[in-house]
Image (cartoon, grey):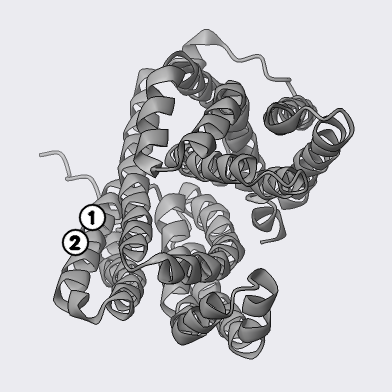
Amino acid sequence: MVANLTTPLIGIVSTTAIGRLGDAALLGGVAMASVIFDCLFWLFAFLRMSTVAFAAQSLGAGEPAELPAILVRGFIVAGLIGSALIVLQVPLAAILLDAMGGSEAVTRAARAYFIIRIWAAPLALSNYVVLGWLIGQARAKRALVLQIAINLINVAATIVLVLVFDWGIAGAAIAAVIAEATGLLLGTAMARRLSEGGLSVARARLFDRAKLMRMLAVNRDIMIRTAALITAFLFFTAQGARSGDVTLAANAVLNNFLLISAFFLDGLANAAEQLCGRSFGARDRHGFADATRLVILWGFGFALVVAAVFALFGPALIDLMTASEAVRRGARDYLVFVVLAPLPSVFAFGFDGVYIGATWARDMRNLMMASLAIFFATWFVLRGLGNIGLWWAMLAFYAARGGLQGARYPALFRASFAPARPASPRP
């Protein structure tokens, strides 16, 4: 959970440092570009998720020799995707920045940030792989150290390049690249130390056809699932914008609450990925069921705590985040939805981890698409309520994700842990 909470800090630190320069266009540009990178890299979060599952399953199956191959395969995929993003940076910047609809000055600043930070793509995606590999082996403390190191380096480099050397938005982007590069070097050194035979992998093992095809299929399904998830949040933001500047700003403030709770509760998904993946690899039926039950129960307890914190301190946090009285009033009007959100969402996060750990990626993809359809249907029915209807649609989306996965779980569990049929006797 603590490691997850550090995830959005690169964008936050860049925004804060640029904000100190007092130029609204620069601030808007780095904020816009940070959102783009959050969504863009989030689309490829399957690199972390699938690596957690494969590493945990290999550990449970007693196949430690497979672990270096899993890491190197992940590096290859991350490198290919990251290189493609660099090659396509010009059309990507044009499409994404135009879609954001910022002013000319803001878009110009965002483009300057984008064309520098995009060079961190192979590094950032490779760091996803390292983090997944560490978490998959229950090395959460090392993962936390790595995340903290990346963010501390980013903070230090941003302060030096932006506030000391006065490199402006370019300095913030360069700092992000430096942080990701240093993090990858540190993560690779950790992995080399943890692997008894180092990271050298025989070509036959690395390019094992069955394992490569399975990895690609799981990654494809998780990517489609993540794209559906991003679609829901982008639609939520776009509809809020159509309700006026005050409503848009109020939703933006409350979205920070959702972001914090999401990264916090997603730590449970990481735990589920490791625990369930290890039990799945060991074919431990009871261990898998116990891990699922443990994650869901603890998750519900944490969700109650998060909801209580938002209910008690939400108004004060809103006042801290905005000085506009109109925005404060608007955010308070919808605060109840943020208080309610952790309760259905924790089941979505918990079962996400269970499904990823067991590599039930196809079902996870299909259920996410069904949840997205429920989100749009709920919004369409309640669209006359304006922003209230939009928030109800978001709660329905969370509830559908957790509810559908929970309903499908027993059948998948029985199919995955069905006892092997005895061989027919020879005549």
All told, the count of numbered labels is: 2
Residue denoted by label 1: 369
Q: Are marks 1 and 2 in contact (CB under 8 Å)?
A: yes
Question: Is residue 55 shown to the viewer in this render?
Answer: no
Amino acid type, label 2: Ala
Foreground tag (1 vs 2): 2
393 sits left or right of 54 in the view: left
Q: Nearer the viewer, residue 424 or 16?
A: 16
Q: Nearer the viewer, residue 374 or 115?
A: 115
Which part of the image, by quadrant, shows the C terminus? top left
Secondary-structure class at tag 1: helix
Q: Residue at x 52, y 30 (%)?
A: 108
Could you classify mark 2 by the number of other residues whose Cα lies within 10 Å: few (under 14), some (14-19), or many (20 or more)? some
Which part of the image, by quadrant, shows the N terminus? bottom right
Secondary-structure class at tag 2: helix
Amino acid type, label 1: Met
Residue denoted by label 2: 373
Q: How far, Cα to Cα, is label 1 from label 2?
A: 6 Å
Question: Is residue 198 shown to the viewer in this render?
Answer: yes
Q: Position of residue 346 (x, y in %)?
A: 48, 72
Q: Residue at x 45, y 71 (%)?
A: 246
Q: Position of residue 400 (x, y in %)?
A: 29, 71
Q: Nearer the viewer, residue 331 or 355?
A: 331
Q: Position of residue 314 (x, y in %)?
A: 61, 83
The quarter of the picture where residue 325 lies is: bottom right
Residue 379 vertical placement versus 62 (above, below): below
Q: Position of residue 229 (x, y in %)?
A: 35, 54
